[in-house]
Image: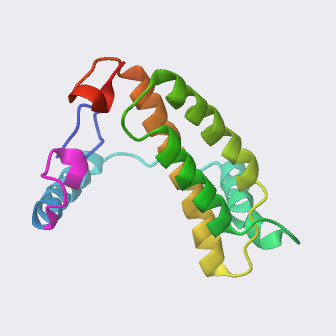
Amino acid sequence: AETSVKGLYAAGDMAAVPHNYMLGAFTYGWFAGRNAAEYVAGRAFSAVDSAQVERERARIEAPLLREHGLPAAQVEYKLRRLVNDYLQPPKVTRKMELGLQRIQAIAEDLERIKADNPHELMRALEVSVIRDCAEMAARASLFRTESRWGLYHHR
């Protein structure tokens, strides 16, 4: 289950397991867990940077402290629309470049999300991760310039 990056292990769809094959994902997850445990056995822990921990805690809890702001569901809807409009096939370079710009601009909306309870905070954090994944997908699609599947990836 080890990837080409030393110490990084994969399972499920990311480990060449057939798409949506749950039993395969579980099996690879088991192997990945064992491999990771063997890799870290006997290694020293890294020093914890208390200031970094506090910055991350403040970032995570910020939506709970805001008086006013955007609902996470609204930002998520906007983000998913951008992905659908700009990143789905057929893939066109200019369209993906515009999509990437708009996905990056969503970072400003993330700073304005308001959460009133732990459930809403979880949704706010999910939107942040969805945005990161959308940006990675856009960058990966722009990096890949070869064409495959005819019109689905035409450049």
Of the 4 image quadrants, the one containing the C terminus is top left
- x, y percent for residue 148: 22, 25
Above or below for 95 versus 110: above
| Numbered label tally | 0
| Region in magenta | 11-22
Q: Residue at x 11, y 62 (%)?
A: 27
55 to the left or right of 131: right
Left or right of 83? Residue 140 is left
> Of 72 and 14, which appears nearest the observer?
72
Residue occupying the point 50% across, 30% down: 96
Residue 144 found in image quarter: top left
* Residue lying furthest right: 67
Quick check: 135 above or below 61?
above
Q: Is residue 38 left or right of residue 135?
A: left
Task: Say whether residue 32 is magenta.
Answer: no
Q: Residue at x 60, y 30 (%)?
A: 98
Who is closer to the viewer here, 110 or 97?
Answer: 97
Structure colour scheme? rainbow
Q: Whole-percent x and y of residue 72?
A: 66, 66
Query: Which of the two residues, 10 or 83, is positioned nearer the viewer here?
Result: 83
| Horizontal and vertical percent position of residue 30 | 16, 62
Q: Is residue 11 visible?
A: no
| Residue at horizontal 19 percent and vertical 46 percent from the top | 15
Q: Is residue 8 above or below residue 65?
A: above
Q: Position of residue 25 (x, y in %)?
A: 17, 60
Residue 149: tell me if it is visible: yes
